[in-house]
Image (spheres, helix red, strand yellow):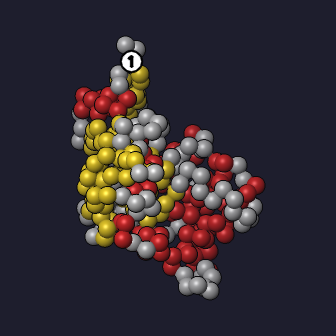
Amino acid sequence: MREILRARDLRAGYGGGDVLRGVSFSLQGGEVCALLGENGSGKTTLLRAACGLLPYRGSCVLSGREAGSLSDRERARRIGWLSQRGGAELPLRGLDVVLMGFNPLLGALQSPTKAQRRRALKALNELGAAEFAERNFTELSAGQRQLVLFARALVRDVELLALDEPESALDLRRRRALFQILRERAARRDCAVLFSSHDVNAALRWANRLLLLRDGELCAGVDLRAASRAEIEAALRAAFGPVELIEHDGHYLMAEVEE
């Protein structure tokens, strides 16, 4: 596996104050990694800093290039980014929103090719969202918009998929489909997936690795492919306090423990 992302002593914040305080980690091709932690722990800040979308101190290297040194166009070529509220006011057809994913590959006056249009439609179809291709994006529900934006992030081959709570507005069936696509994409294309979530149980089911944040610091990291139940439980407790793991249908679920 090739190394996709390496962060060392990463520090970032807003208005002169640090939200992240010295976070270090690395991601390999084929890995799906979940960022977990309570509200305000720094998940979104870490995602944005790791992509070079937020000024940072320390080092964050994306396939040999410092993320903060990338131009907007080069960053868009290398990273498929999905924010929590991206594209909320785009007065375009769903298909045109997905086609925006090809903008980093196009010249100033160049339109998407027929092959790119076919690929955009295929991305929507894989998500069960083909019906939104001709719909006005602003008229879609929050969950429908999220599917269209996810298709935009997936439409090109990238080195890193960085997704901020990608499943937050989706129903259970759509969530399962989304995470299945992420797992398959990471394995097939040798890219890395880094996503934040409040759904610990979804992360336990679909991620290969967990990075757990508490008060802007990396309090634990665990490889779910190799860790024991006790090691996973200890990592979750470092971020969430008293919890326990319950095994169900071959997977772990996290439950709170009353003190």
Residue 203 image point, x, y percent: 41, 41
Q: Residues within 10 Å of mark 1 (few under 14, many from 20)?
A: few
Relative height, residue 99 to residue 83 (above, below): below
Left or right: 230 as drawn, with respect to 251? left
Left or right: 128 as drawn, with respect to 199? right
Residue 48 image point, x, y percent: 44, 56
The answer to whether any part of residue 250 appears in the image is no
Relative height, residue 36 to residue 59 (above, below): above
The residue that label 1 is drawn on is: 257
For image coordinates 64% across by 48% down, the residue present is 143
Q: Which amino acid does label 1 sit on?
A: Val
Residue 112 image point, x, y percent: 61, 79
Task: Quadrant for the C terminus, please.
Answer: top left
Task: Quadrant for the N terminus, please.
Answer: bottom left
Tell which of 203 and 121 is nearer to you. Answer: 203
For image coordinates 36% across by 71% down, the residue present is 69
